Amino acid sequence: MAPILQLRGVTKRFPGVIALEEIDLDIEPGEVHILVGENGAGKSSLVKVLCGIYTRDEGEILYQGQPYNPQRTQDALHAGIRVVYQEFNLLPYLSVAENIFFEKLPTKHGLVDYKKLNQDAEAVLKEVGLDVAPTSRVELLGVAQTQLIEIAKAISTESKVLFLDEPTATLTPREISRLFDIIRRLRQRGVTIIYISHRLQETFEIGDRVTVLRNGRKVDTLPMADVTVADLVRMMVGKKMGEEYPFDTTVAPGAEIFRVNNLVIKHGGAPLGFGVRAGELLGIAGLVGSGRTETMRAIFGADKRIAGDLVLNGQPLRVESPRDAVQAGLSMLTEDRKQQGLILDMPCYVNISLTDLAAVSRSGVLNHAAEVTAAEGLVDELSIRTSSVDKWVRFLSGGNQQKVVLAKWLFRGPQVLIFDEPTRGIDVGAKYEIYMLLWALAKAGKAIIIVSSDLPELLGICHRILVFSNWAISGEVERPDFSQERILELAYQNYVQTEAAPA
Amino acid sequence: MSTQVTSAPERESSQARRTTYFLLREAGIGIALLLIIVFFSVFAPRFASLANLSNILTQISINTVIAVGMTFVILLGGIDLSVGAVLALCTVVAGLTMTSTAFPEPVAIGLAVLASLAVGSAAGLFNGFVAERWKIHSFIVTLGMLNIARGAALQISGSRTIFSFPAGFNQFGTQTILGVPVIFVIALTLVFLGRFVLVRTVFGRIIYAIGNNEEAVRLSGHTPSFYKIAAFTITGLCVGVAAIMYMLRLNIASPILGVGFELNAIAAVVIGGTSMSGGKGSMIGTFLGACIIGVLNNGLLLLGMGDFARQMVTGFIIIFAVIIDTYRVRLSVQMAD
């Protein structure tokens, strides 16, 4: 049978990053095709290219033998290609039936025909095995039920190709097995399913073939019967070419200066704790959604925590808000610099001095000259490329914006620095400069915590790596024992265990 | 973009750019005001006279003071609809205090002024606190306060107008300093004080920053709620000052004063180029905005236009000003690059 989707040399670039590079891929009609890869390997980009959110830069896609060039998501929907996302796109205040048929509500005399709507919905709900009234409001349903409604919606529109993006992330084992039944039924009806999951184990239950992506390239496509979990992990891991990491063996970390004890951030979650030493670069690895960012935000006081103590220099620390944290000598470079780190429509110097306005003011009155001088000093020190410190941050490149965030924390001079994805979305040159800055801070005796989805980066620059898995620390690896395999194994550990539990 | 160290000529050019940026943002409104003045000087009889000028300055003073306060909350992306009703409440409380026979005259006047400031600030504090504590949009909270203050003013005064203030008080209202009406001097002082707070102090810096990106400010170690509550309190304080100015001017206090004042103040702020979504704007702009509204009202009246038609023209001018502003912002953003 001819493939339903054929990709030839599909490439997608972003400034400074290649998201997809020359992907060749054939998807057979009616198969369940598994897509795996590390964070940032290109899975989401591939889905977005196929469903019209991104347009590819190069390459060719054939859908049912015809050229396929979706410009918008509507194009993909019309063609019968649909994505069920991790985050749901339902309308919470409308009924189940209205949500399922929202794109094509049955009408009579120009009004919605609710009788037919609810009857049709009932039939579809039966098909996915969901026992809720078509008239109940979606906001009242649980996560698993909501997910099934997304799938019901896909069935009702007679999609030919269905992408499932991490569909089991929030489901219980019983719900997962029901989802798998539905997937099998869909396959029997000839629907092609492309299934993306971090949970490698479970993919073997339903997958026909698997494609592994790494750094935007396809590693291989193989029948599931021919591979094991260990094979997949091995294929997912790989050195990135052309990137160097500075690691200075002459800098030995000193005594532990900051410690987190019994931190609980989720109801029913296991308490976690760790310490970091002066002059140490501590990496935090783990899959996206494993609780890394949430943990850091809770430590910094940005979000409420349920329990947990902080200790700085042997003294207990009370942190109820970011204000407490900053005053105690903590800092946090957030994952999303534009939303949370920068004031884009204000000058560089305003952004830099924001963390310590007391240092550039007297009795509440700003000393403009002192502020500008301090900012210019940091701009030079960090080689921030801007024509002047008056320039709005919006007009700087991504790497330089990130350096402004760094500069603002250096201006405060904290003892403990938390960096959440410090090099995301910036080019290789700026990345290297940021690594050198992190090292300079370590040499100055600061304690540094780096959360990153870029594993080679953590392996390259850290003394020690903590691995998060499913909202717990699943392990700790010291530099001499660093290996991608070991860390990935730990990162997947707590997900594999939940699946091993009987349904 | 390509150079990494800032050299002297580049700093100069950045200075030049800042000047251009300033001209676009603030002088644009000034030019509009000048054009309007020129127009009326030519076409409106008696417009260009010292007596009329003094008249205009008196007329715009109260709106200017309220708009100074309003600028703070609009810079934060908020709004205060209660200013007119709170002004009425302030005049009633101050009027009753002033006409009370329990105190000697000068003490009664002093207490009345303090009472007005206290009532205004308290209303503002309430607005800010409720909006922040329960994360309710200030539109709703101040709409509630509008009714509360109006009702309280009617209740306290028994819905009567209060007059016959001490002669010393009434006289002070008609004073001029070098020919300038004293209440305009008060208004102008508050404009420059407000500008100083916004441009030169840590407080003002954080107000702008919150208006642009509250979360970034919070994560930089500040407490946005404090600044937001303070901004509403400042607005209330300005209303307290405006209430006394109103009493100086008309020598009455009444629970039905100030209807629609919130709209005039918001109009001044918006015509002055402050963005309703917060973070961008200036106090001088607000002052010029208040001038434009005042001059238009005065000039159109002298042209023989009736109340209703003038109201329509003012409405069109507000919309026109905001349309112009969208172009100006786009242009100044390009200049800032």
Image: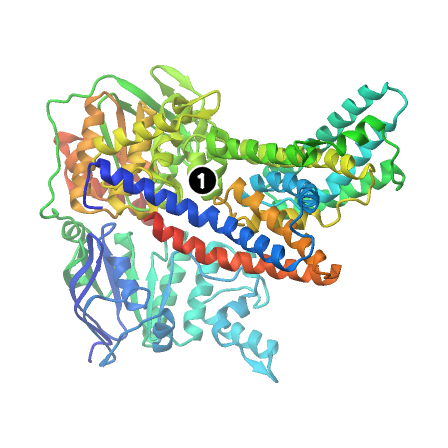
* Side of A178 where A440 appears, left or right: left
Q: Which one is in front, B12 or A67?
A: B12
* Side of B301 where B337 appears, left or right: left
In the displayed orientation, state which residue is furthest to the left: A242
Q: Which one is in front, A71 or A391?
A: A391
Going by the numbered disc 1, the residue's amino acid type is Glu
* Side of B255 where A461 appears, left or right: left
**x%, y% of residue B291?**
61, 47
Residue occupied by mark 1: B215
From this view, report whether residue A118 is shown above or below residue B238: below
Q: Residue at x 32, y 76 (%)?
A: A190
In the displayed orientation, state which residue is furthest to the top: A314
Instruction: Say which quadrant the N terminus of chain A sits in.
Output: bottom left
**x%, y% of residue B300?**
68, 58
The answer to whether one can see residue A228 in this image is yes
Q: Residue at x 36, y 71 (%)?
A: A185
| Mark 1 burial class by Cα count in 10 Å: few <14, some 14-19, many 20+ | some
The answer to whether one can see residue A169 in this image is no
**x%, y% of residue A251?**
14, 22
- Would you identify the image quadrant in which residue A202 lies? bottom left
- Would you identify the image quadrant in which residue B144 lies? top right
- Would you identify the image quadrant in which residue B164 lies? top right
Q: Which one is in front, B103 or B80?
A: B103
* Side of B131 where A445 appears, left or right: left
Q: Please tell me whether mark 1 sits on a helix, a strand or a loop.
A: helix
Q: Residue at x 50, y 36 (%)?
A: B207
From this view, report whether residue B319 is shown above or below residue A172: below
